[in-house]
Amino acid sequence: MHESNTPPRRVAVIGGGITGLAAAHRLVELAPSVQVTLFEASDRLGGVLRTERRDGFLVETAADNFITTVPWAIDLCRRIGFEDQLIPTNSGYRHAFVVRRGKLHHIPDGFVVMAPSKVWPIVTTPILSPLGKLRMAGELLMPRRRQAGDESLAAFIRRRFGRETYERLVQPLVGGIYTGDPSRLSLQSTMPRFAEMEQQHGSLIRAMYKQPKRKEQGSGARYSMFVAPRDGMSSLVSAIAARLPAESIRLNTPIRQLQRTERGWSLSLLNSPERAAEFDEVIVTTPAKPTSRLIATMDEELAGELDEIHHARCSIVSLAYTRDQIAHPLDGFGVVVPAIERRRILSASFSSVKYPGRAPEGSVLIRVFIGGDCQPDLADRSDEELLQIAHEELQQLLGIRGEPTMQFISWRAKMPQYFVGHTEKVSRMRSLLERHQGLELAGNAHDGVGIPNCIHSGEQAAERLMLTAAREAPQTNPV
Ligand SMILES: Cc1cc2nc3c(=O)[nH]c(=O)nc-3n(C[C@H](O)[C@H](O)[C@H](O)COP(=O)(O)OP(=O)(O)OC[C@H]3O[C@@H](n4cnc5c(N)ncnc54)[C@H](O)[C@@H]3O)c2cc1C
């Protein structure tokens, strides 16, 4: 209960994706007396996270899991009593494939996104030529980079391991994670760990060997570290929303503009009988472009920084087949496709192999990613074309007979791209934001696109507001 005579503090959270939900939840958790209002433009919460159920299939329209080695998502799940809803990846098939000359090959065991940790799988892999393997081993002799500052992922890998490792392994793996073009992506903002390894150990191979060995076999992503909600991402969204006061959530209420007032902040509302609402503080969690528009009239410079952040477009086609339609054993979680293979898909995830409960008995669910920054025009094709591309590519790669038994398209997902120099951009945005007391920005445009990072970003924004308020609260009663 609010005990003093002063009215409760009002905080607005704009955007009802996972970042906004995490921010609102943290505010309620830290200060139950604060009046939180979460404004969401659409008619549902979750933002890009959405689970669809079709004919017995569970289809994720964007993210299908999250990593647990960065703690923030798993911590939140524990705090809201959701941990028992999380399931690990299927332990039988924790590896992935890469295409070479139209055929699927296992990504060498121990090759984790950018670097190898085992010798024999590299020696025996058919993915690299003997020269490519020699050049990879030459990484041990490559000098450390002397210049300070950022470089692209592609430049870093070509410099350390050579062109072939980049084109055949790293480009498709990184392209699969960020739907991006590694020749523009920032090493510092996406994979800083590998830059540190080079500086500390002089070689990535040496650094990987010094890491404690895990028993598990695997390659590509570190699959044992991922979990998914048993009933899909939407169940996590609902579980967080259920912890917020019902009256705090306002769907179908896009915010048009944000303005500073004498006492706080004024939000102009669209689709609402009230034209404006006043708040003491605001957390904006919308993607970079909408955030830029929201603040454009009050801070052109900050809005400009946000507007510059590029987003890669990608379409996801989910296709289902009966198991006996597919010749390939599907003994892995999916396949990534190098750009030099000149195919029309980025990757395919074998959803029903990765997690149980994604397809009825005897059926298989596959999610195909099309577009991304290396093939941007493909993402915008019509539904019919996308379905055809996805099916034809799977037919050729996996040996599929007949037509899909179920198909579903999630259109034009957008993923922010952290280009070279992104860390400096984030620092500039932070210092510009200091001019606006009581305003916080959070979300996937800043310090990581993964769900745990988005949750952390929302929670930190809430914590900063609460901390500032505690510092400013009168220490003695005014007479
Ligand atoms: C295809 C795809 C696959 C992914 N896979 C994974 C994965 O497997 N694992 C992982 O960890 N991460 C993954 N990610 C990344 C992760 O899912 C996203 O970065 C994260 O969910 C973004 O959450 P958000 O709340 O910041 O933004 P969003 O989900 O975009 O939410 C923003 C919300 O703001 C609302 N909004 C916009 N404008 C306004 C306005 N003016 N007023 C009010 N509301 C507004 C929107 O309607 C939306 O609901 C994936 C992303 C994509 C696109």
Image (spheres, rainbow, N blue to C red):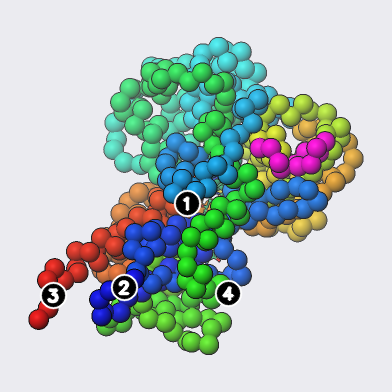
Q: Can residue 70 be seen in this view?
A: yes
- Label placed on residue 2: 2
- The foreground one among 95 and 183 is 95
Q: Distance between the residues labelled 2 and 4?
A: 29 Å
Q: Quadrant of the C terminus?
A: bottom left
Write the residue at 45% across / 18% down: 213
- Label placed on residue 477: 3
| Magenta segment main secondary structure | loop
Q: Tell me whether the residue at label 4 lies in contact with that at label 3, contact meaning CB atoms closer than 8 angstroms.
A: no
Image: magenta residue range:
355-366
Write the residue at 61% across / 34% down: 89
Q: Is residue 305 visible?
A: no
Return the disc, 3 or 2, that comes first in the chain's sequence: 2
Q: Position of residue 224 (x, y in %)?
A: 54, 30
Q: Distance between the residues labelled 1 and 2?
A: 24 Å
**Does the magenta run of residues contain 335?**
no
Q: What element carries label 4?
A: loop
Write the residue at 40% across / 51% down: 456
- Label placed on residue 80: 1
Q: Nearer the viewer, mark 2 or mark 4?
A: 2
The amino acid pointed to by label 3 is Asn
Quadrant of the image occupied by residue 3: bottom left
The amino acid pointed to by label 4 is Asn
- Label placed on residue 252: 4
Along the horizontal axis of the image, is 380 left or right of 275? right
- The foreground one among 330 and 476 is 476
Q: Distance between the residues labelled 4 and 3?
A: 41 Å
